[in-house]
Image: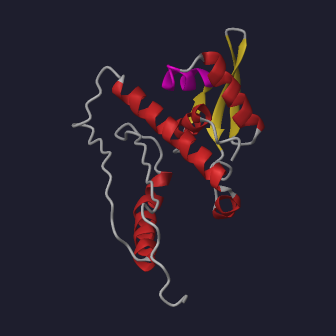
Amino acid sequence: MELLGHPVRLRIVHAMRGGRTLTTSQLCDRIPEVSKATVYRHIDLLSAGGILQVTDERRVRGAMERHYQLRQDRAVIDTAMIESLTLDDHRRGFAVAMTALLAEFNAYLDRDHADPAADLVGYRQHAVWLSRDELLEMISQLRHAIAPLLTNPPMPDRTQYLLSPILFPIDEPPADPQAG
């Protein structure tokens, strides 16, 4: 969690998803508002932590150019980890995720040809009333819809979209009528 809990590192992980192999220079191009030195430092941390792996090395103009790939199995926050987090850990993790999300959206809007309407950008929020069973069913349906798409490789006709389902209760759960 500590390794993924930084907005720049999270953005690097986003950029690497989908089986991409990228150089540090390509990652710097994807995150132009962050200094190259900072991107290099975070790539080194992710590589040392086993989140990124070097797939190729080439000498280019006297320097070693490394090609990195995301280790999908290491870039996951699993159920056991989530259950071990404190409320403050969740607070920090959510803040990092929102900071990275905001940075990604601003980077999109800063592109020369950004067109939210044409790109079908969405950021709606809905408040829905759900029983626990309905919540579990909705989560299952979302997983069923999203999971197969996570393995899509980059292709000329595909654009990478950032999908961020966010789910948390906004009301206290009802009192248990049988606990009484």
- As drawn, is 105 to the left or to the right of 44? left
Taking the view exactly as shown, the residue that stands out farthest to the top is: 61
Q: Residue at x 22, y 36 (%)?
A: 118
Q: Residue at x 46, y 64 (%)?
A: 143
Taking the view exactly as shown, the residue that stands out farthest to the left is: 117
Res 63 quadrant in image: top right
Magenta stretch: dominant SS?
A: helix
- As drawn, is 100 to the left or to the right of 45? left
Q: Residue at x 68, y 50 (%)?
A: 74
Stretch in magenta: 24-33
Is there any visible trace of residue 76 in the rendered image? no
- As drawn, is 46 to the left or to the right of 15? right
Where residue 68 sits in the image (x, y, percent)? 65, 33
Where residue 59 sits in the image (x, y, percent)? 71, 17
Please tell me whether residue 170 is drawn above or below residue 134 in the rendered image. Answer: above
The total number of labels drawn is 0
Please tell me whether residue 33 is drawn above or below residue 87 in the rendered image. Answer: above
Please tell me whether residue 41 is drawn above or below residue 75 in the rendered image. Answer: above
Res 87 quadrant in image: bottom right
Residue 7 part of the magenta segment: no
Where residue 115 sits in the image (x, y, percent)? 25, 31
Q: Residue at x 34, y 27 (%)?
A: 109
